[in-house]
Image: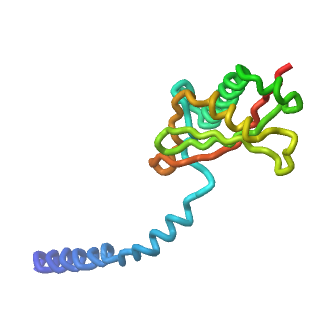
Amino acid sequence: MKKILAILFFSSFFFASCQLFDKKVPDEKELLKKQLNEINWNEVDEYPSIVDCEKIADKEQRKRCFFEFMTSTIEQKLNIDSLSTEFPKLDTIEVKVTVFPTSEVAFQPQFPKDSVAYDTIKIDSILHARLIDFPKVNPAIKRGIPVKTQFVLPVIIKQE
């Protein structure tokens, strides 16, 4: 009798516990929609970087290291040229930097819409000529995938 009760008890427990695992699988589209809403599309997980900055563990310090490197390198390369003598009123230029997933870097000067005081084509050609051999930049990472990023850096032309 005890064996029968034990068998009934364990078999009822077994069948009842199977219902705990009988949950509905969420809809694939619903899960995808939820995941896409959770992603912050305006932020990357890791900013672009260079080899020297990758040794830094803190994310904000690594970001600061990278932007300081970019700004100082662009300033050094442009100070070689005659931008400050040809354009004496130009003390700072904003440069849009694009880092592609392939580690390629593109530079584009940003001018105010009413910038008739400068020869924008000449400044653009000087910028591209001086920044042709730019050091390797590792792309930004979003969810484990290299992504394209763009940012604008103020570059000081005149240093007094």
Figure disc tally: 0
| Nearer to me, 42 or 150 | 150
| Residue 109 at x, y percent in the picture | 71, 41
Identify the residue at image location x=17%, y=80%: 8
- Image side of residue 144 versus residue 17, left or right: right
Quarter assignment of residue 61 = top right
Is residue 10 placed above or below 75 in the rendered structure? below
Is residue 86 placed above or below 153 in the rendered structure? above
The quarter of the image holding the N terminus is bottom left
| Nearer to me, 149 or 117 | 117
| Residue 35 at x, y percent in the picture | 50, 64
Identify the residue at image location x=51%, y=27%: 51
- Image side of residue 127 versus residue 51, left or right: right
Visual colour scheme: rainbow
| Residue 21 at x, y percent in the picture | 31, 73
- Image side of residue 159 versus residue 147, left or right: right
The quarter of the image holding the C terminus is top right
| Residue 120 at x, y percent in the picture | 76, 41
Identify the residue at image location x=55%, y=62%: 38
Identify the residue at image location x=82%, y=47%: 112
Quarter assignment of residue 80 = top right
Is residue 93 placed above or below 15 in the rendered structure? above
